[in-house]
Amino acid sequence: MAKLICLVSVASAEWIRVPGGSWVHDSCIHEILDGKVADVPECPFPTYAADAYAPNTLGQMEPSVSSPKVQCYDQKAYSTSSSEFTQMNASFVVPPMPAKNAGQTVFLWPGFKATAPIIGRPVLQPVLQSYYGASWQLQSWGVGIPAGTMTGPKIDVSEGDLITSYMELVDDTWTIYGKNTRTGQESILRLSKSQACSGCQYTNAVFVSENIMDRYQCDYYPKNTGIEFMDIVVNGKVEHGTQWQSGYDCGSPDCQQEVKSTTDGKSVQLTWNGGSPSPVPSPTPGCVDLDDASSCSSWKSAGYCSSSSQYYSYMQEHCCNSCGFGFFQV
């Protein structure tokens, strides 16, 4: 099932800012509600990079070197491969809302980007989002794709919730997935390889703090001073040793932003205002994987961790940690 959705835009009723850093025409934002591959037509309008274009007073897109609220990647960790990434898992804790609500937008996400790890390029991403100061939601996105934009359903999340997420290509189908482990709600987007990209590959893995806000407004950031993406699995490998590079695409850090990663590549921290992320959840004692991690990861990607799966009881017992069951806050 697919439907058109329209997100509120302060600039134009026709052009919408979306995570990943693009302007997309509102007729080309398609929400897929049932987690199945949907037949969605190609968008007849171009997608524009949000840091280079803006709609004028007539609603027409034109080059723009500045904007009252700049959309950019204020910090990112990224890795570029010579071949396409096919899978990445990551979990993270929802931070508190910003101390000040000035109508700013905050996007925090792991993702795969095609062609280059920069704004405005095609991206597959489960996004923690606060649009124009609204409460946190989690939503899976495909942006800059032939249809324009496709999304899974939005789900509500709250400060302290543990989110598990992944992007995975199996045969000809991409799955972009996010789950609130407290409520069990999921945002699932599935699309075919041709729907995900026209003649390109997702060769960039990224973790991004992306904002639409004025610079040097440090109280516009979540007030816990950081987010950690943890338990990172890449291309089905727990021991992958990915070396993450750092980037600050908005310019020099204006609020003490810093990118930190572990040498084994399993953890990436994006911090701001000189702080550290919220305390990391630890698994409940006894919540471990009894089967090997690669099998648990594969079964998780197939949806076996879902409470509606016939294998749910088995996964609770044998793949507890991979499924994100039974976490508590330390």
Image: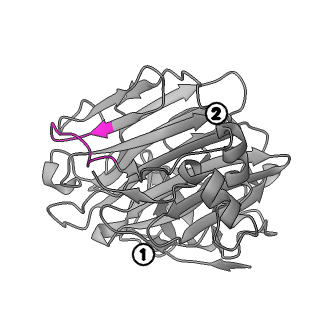
Q: Is residue 230 visible?
A: yes
Query: Magenta includes 272?
Result: yes
Q: Is residue 22 left or right of residue 251?
A: right
Q: Is residue 147 visible?
A: no
Tags 2 and 1 touching, CB below 8 Å: no
* Colouring scheme applied when the structure was drawn: one colour
Q: Is residue 314 left or right of residue 329?
A: right
Q: Does label 2 or label 1 sit earlier along the sequence? A: 1
Q: Residue at x 68, y 38 (%)?
A: 292
Q: Residue at x 34, y 32 (%)?
A: 248
Magenta residues (range): 270-280
* Mark 1, residue position: 8
Q: Is residue 136 left or right of residue 320?
A: left
Q: Which amino acid, mark 1?
A: Val
Q: Residue at x 34, y 51 (%)?
A: 211
Spatial distance from mark 2 to mark 1, Cα to Cα?
29 Å
Give the secondary structure at mark 1.
Answer: loop
Q: Which mark is residue 115?
A: 2
Q: Position of residue 57 (x, y in %)?
A: 39, 68
Query: Magenta includes 155?
Result: no
Q: Position of residue 317 (x, y in %)?
A: 62, 57
Give the secondary structure at mark 2.
Answer: loop
Query: In terms of image quadrants, where is residue 209?
Result: top left
